[in-house]
Amino acid sequence: MAATEYFVHASSYIDDGVQIGAGTYVWHFSHVLSGSKIGRNCSLGQNVMVGPDVTIGDGCKIQNNVSLYKGVHLEDDVFCGPSCVFTNVVTPRANVNRKSEFAKTIVRRGASIGANATIVCGRELGEYCFIAAGAVVTKDVPAYALMVGVPARRIGWVSKSGDILGADLICPRTSEKYERVDGALRALS
């Protein structure tokens, strides 16, 4: 892929063996490590670190000061708010090498993670879930869940557009309908 199909600011570093999709922007002071794959039409803000071996889908927005470590996989259209944190081991110690224990963290399509939220590794965030600013996710998150607090707990449901759903499970913005299925939501339309 020709470098002219995407933009990398002169202050950023892209290691060998990285794939970047057309229409993607990598802004100031960022570093993408080898083996990482970034999809089309993404935006990586200032001071973003990706990799090694991280996968980012199409249309993702990674705000300033976010590090995506080995084991993190973002599907399409994921939003990572400023300074949100992904851990890579469950029990870190400076004096113990645990690189072989890096756990896989999967963030499903359309999920949003608020500023300063922490995602403990080895978790799966369901599609279109919404993690509030400052929340600490320690368990898997169902699709469309609205999660807040420390540790994060579900306080409601959100639609694909991010609007809070009432008891009728109808999006106030789009009128899209949802139903409960096995502890999560599913869009009916």
Image: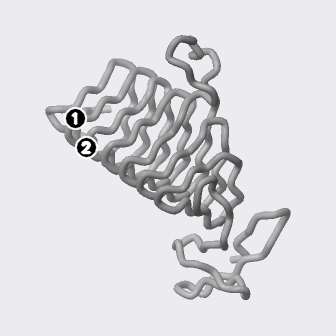
Q: What element carries label 2?
A: loop
Residue 11's place in the image compared with 59, above or below, is above
Residue drawn 60% across the image and 83% down it: 171
Q: Where is residue 42 in the image (x, y as percent from the top left)?
A: 37, 49
> Camera-side residue: 80 or 108?
80
Mark 2 Cα shell of 10 Å, populated few (<14), some (14-19), many (≥20): many
> Camera-side residue: 189 or 141?
141
Residue drawn 52% across the image and 46% down it: 118
Q: Quadrant of residue 131?
A: bottom right
Q: What element carries label 1?
A: loop
Mark 1 Cα shell of 10 Å, populated few (<14), some (14-19), many (≥20): some
Amino acid type, mark 2? Gln
Any mark on residue 46, and which? 2
* Left-right relation of 91 to 25: right
* Residue, disc 1: 29
Residues at discs 2 and 1 in contact (Cβ within 8 Å): yes
Amino acid type, mark 1? Phe
